[in-house]
Structures are given as structure tokens and as C-alpha cells.
Amino acid sequence: MTETTTSARQPSAPRQRCSRCVLSAAFPSIKFDAEGVCNFCRNELGSRSDDAAIDRGRAMVAELFATPKARRATYDAVLCNSGGKDSSYTLKLAVEKYGLTVLSFTLDNGFIAPAARDNIHRVVDALGVDHITVRPALNVFKSVVRAASVLPIYREQSLTRISAGCNACISLVNTTALRLALEKEIPFILAGFTLGQIPANGIVYRNHYRFLAESREESMSRLRDAVGNDVNRLYEVPDSVIDRVQSYPYNINLLCLESITEAQILAEVGKFGWQRPSGVDGCSSNCTLNTFNNYVHDRRYGYSPYELELSHLVRKSLMTRSEALEKLADQPLEQLPYLVKLLALSPEDLATLGLSADGLVVG
Amino acid sequence: MNADQVAERDRILEELVTFVARSFMVQASDIDMDKSLIDQGVIDSFGLVEITTFIENTFGVKILEQDMTREAFGSMNKMATFVCRRKNGET
């Protein structure tokens, strides 16, 4: 039994999907059985392993937050706040459930929906949280997104859960959050990732910068070749900061410890005045660039970067399969002309991406 | 390593390979045990985070800042040897 849906890349082209989740035939290593169910849905061993990792993450969080706080730090945690529903709800968890003193931080990539900016202010004000915004040089960031979209900056294996453009942005968020945490001696970095976006073994981890930076050097080198040395100040923490480090902060993804539906999250953040922005695709609640990034990923690899996350939510009964399919289908491709104009893509870039000179999908 | 330690190391390697194959959607037979997983394109930097967390949780081995080197994590074989030695109290 197979089921077909249409794709943003080729709106009229059928796409085989798992009959239980929403993974499609182009997803790496996927196999379908006679009932049309994928091997990821059938993998009970993996599911039990994830449950065990979540339990360990929960125990680690309890232990870490119970440890007497370092009094030198003004804040217990810096929280990466995109303005989306998940990071907004994570901020609520940090403040109300865990009692943390939080510094909220937003990386303004120039593509945050105006309503998402309003949401950020509403939520931090409602929770009484200090907030800062860091805006990297927009010309450099756009060059990074352009390079990630048309060149093989990142290995394909690292892009099963995320588009290249989002990966470039999230890396920048993570680096900036780490720099803030180190400079202000903040012991925890919080983010609103959900399971599916990150693996269960990534719920709590220590951010050993030099070791991880070494492993990123290959993609950084490609990025430098494409964009220039401006990327260094965006993606690297200065030695003067690292040399003073006595203890690296923990990165903690609190939302992965919760069993909560999107509707429940929306209801909770709605109490702070959070409203769903317009102009974003069905898989984002803050960033207008996501539509472009999804398009590029789908065109390059033949599947959506959100399939893994949404499939996880479906398997955990936190979202129905039809809701997940609706999100995947909600891609406002009519915004591509506006977005590619903002990114100042060249005619060659547009051709590489299957877009006309006006930014319309041509094939 | 004595014979018992070699057998233990092989068991650790098998568990690591199973984890990597499942988590990073690769066939175990496609992994070169003597090359860096990053260099092979199997994982990225976050993959290293996942593996270190898996090692700590599964084998009860505490990984310290100074352990995070290519010598310890530069290949599947190196990781298995590192875990085996640490479990046996060696530094």
C-alpha cells in the first residue's frame, strides 16, 4: 500500500509517504514494508532507546538545576528566543516551572516576521525577563545563506533534520549564545528545540567549544572560501574568551522533556498575548526565510527538512498525521520572489535553484 | 589489553556501531572503523555531542574536557578503546 501527496518542489508530482508518519520516499535510508509503513515507525528498539535517553535527560536537568547556583552569575540561563511558539513556551517553563533567572536572547537575522518581534516583547514582558537582541551584519548573513543554499557548504548527512539555510542560522544562534554565556558566566544555555528537531541524546550536553569547533572546521573553511573572513567573527568565539573558560555551560532543551501538543503550547503562550504571525510557512512561527530554506532543501534532496520532526510528533500522538501533512503543504511559494530579491541572488544562483529571474519556480 | 579486555572492547565497539548506524542512518558496513566519522561525512559536530552523551549514559564513563581529542574520538576503534580503558580505570 502506498500513499501519495504533492510536494512544494513539484506541486503536481506525487510523492510516496509512510502510511503512518509523514516521511517520504527520498528520506535517507527509508524503506517501506508491504503495508506502506516505514522502517523508522517499525523501529521499536530506537523508540525504547529514545525513552531511556529522555529519562536520563530529565534526571540530569533535576540534578543540574538543584546544584547551588554560581553566585557570580547574574543569570542562571541564557535562552535562545526566536519568538516562535516553542521558544516562547520554553521561556515560560524556565521561569515558572524551574524558577530560573533568565536572559532572553534573540538573534535578529533580518527575516523575523514583524508579528514575531511583537510576540517576543509580549512574552518577555509578561514573564518579567531581561531581553537582548543581537543583529549580525545583514550583508554577511545574507551571503552565508546564499552560499549555504547554492554550494555544498554542509555535508548532506548533517541536513536530514534541518535545511542548509536554517543550519547556518542556528549555528550562529548557538555560537552567539555560547559567547554571551561565557562572557557573563551563565551556566546554562536553553533552547526550544523539540525531539525530532534534535535527537534524544542531545537534550542535555556540555558545549566543549574547541572540540566542536575543530569538527566544524571543514564547513567553516568552505564558508570562508565562499563568503570571506567576515564569517569568523560571526561563527567563532575569540580565544581571549575561550582561554579564560573554567567550565563550559550546559546546553539544555527543556521542551524535549515535556509531553505536550502544539495546541496546548499555543494555548499557554496565547495567555501572554502571543499570536501566530502571518507570512510564515506552516512549519515556522517566526521566520519568513523558512519558506525559501524549505524550498531549497526540498529541491536538493527531495524531502522536507521538517519530515523527521513532524513524524516524531505523529508517532508520539502529539500531532495527527493529517495535521502534519497540512503543515508540510503550507509553503507560501508565492513569497519566493520577494525573498530572493532580499537575498540578492545572482541569475546563476536562481538558475541553480530552479527559479526564474523573477524568483518563480520554473522546474 | 588482555583477552578479556579485547572482548570487552569488541562488545563496546558493537554497541557504538549499532548506535551510530541507527542514529545517523548509515549502514554499519559502510563505516570505516579507522577513520573519523566526521571525515567520512557520517556525523557533524552535533553528532559528536550525541555520541559523547551516549557513551556517558550507556557505559557510565565520564568524559572530561581533556578527553575530547581526536586521539579518543578520531574513529570508531579509537572510541571503543577509549571507553574500554576508562571503564577499566585507565586514563
Image: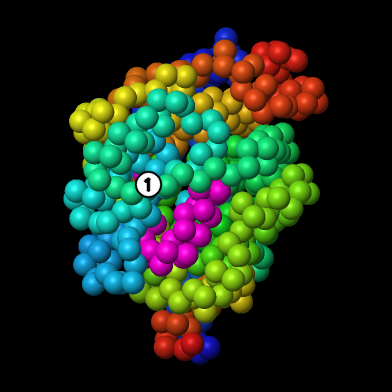
B18 sits left or right of A54 in the view: right
The residue under the point 54% across, 18% down is: A7
Question: Magenta stretch containing residue A182, yes or no?
Answer: yes
Question: Magenta stretch containing residue A94, yes or no?
Answer: no
Of residue A119 and residue A38, the one placed in the foreground of this image is A119
A308 sits left or right of A337 in the view: left
A62 sits left or right of A299 in the view: left
Which residue lies under the disc numbered 1? A131
**Image quadrant of residue B61?**
bottom left
List x then y, in percent, for residue A189. Answer: 39, 57
* Amino acid type indicated by mark 1: His
Give the farthest residue toward the right. Answer: A348
B43 sits left or right of B18 in the view: right
Give the farthest residue toward the top. Answer: A12
Q: On screen, A235 above or below A322?
A: below
The residue under the point 55% across, 48% down is: A172
List x then y, in percent, for residue A52. Answer: 29, 56
Of residue B79 and residue A324, the one placed in the foreground of this image is A324
The residue under the point 35% across, 20% down is: A322
List x then y, in percent, for residue B14. Answer: 48, 66
Label 1 packing within 10 angstroms: few (<14), some (14-19), many (20+): some
Question: Is residue B6 at all visible to an observer of this figure?
Answer: yes
Count of marks overlaid on the render: 1
List x then y, in percent, for residue A311. Answer: 39, 33
Helix or strand or loop: what does disc 1 sit on?
A: strand
Question: Is residue A41 at all visible to an observer of this figure?
Answer: no
Q: What's drawn in magenta, residue-wise?
A: A170-195
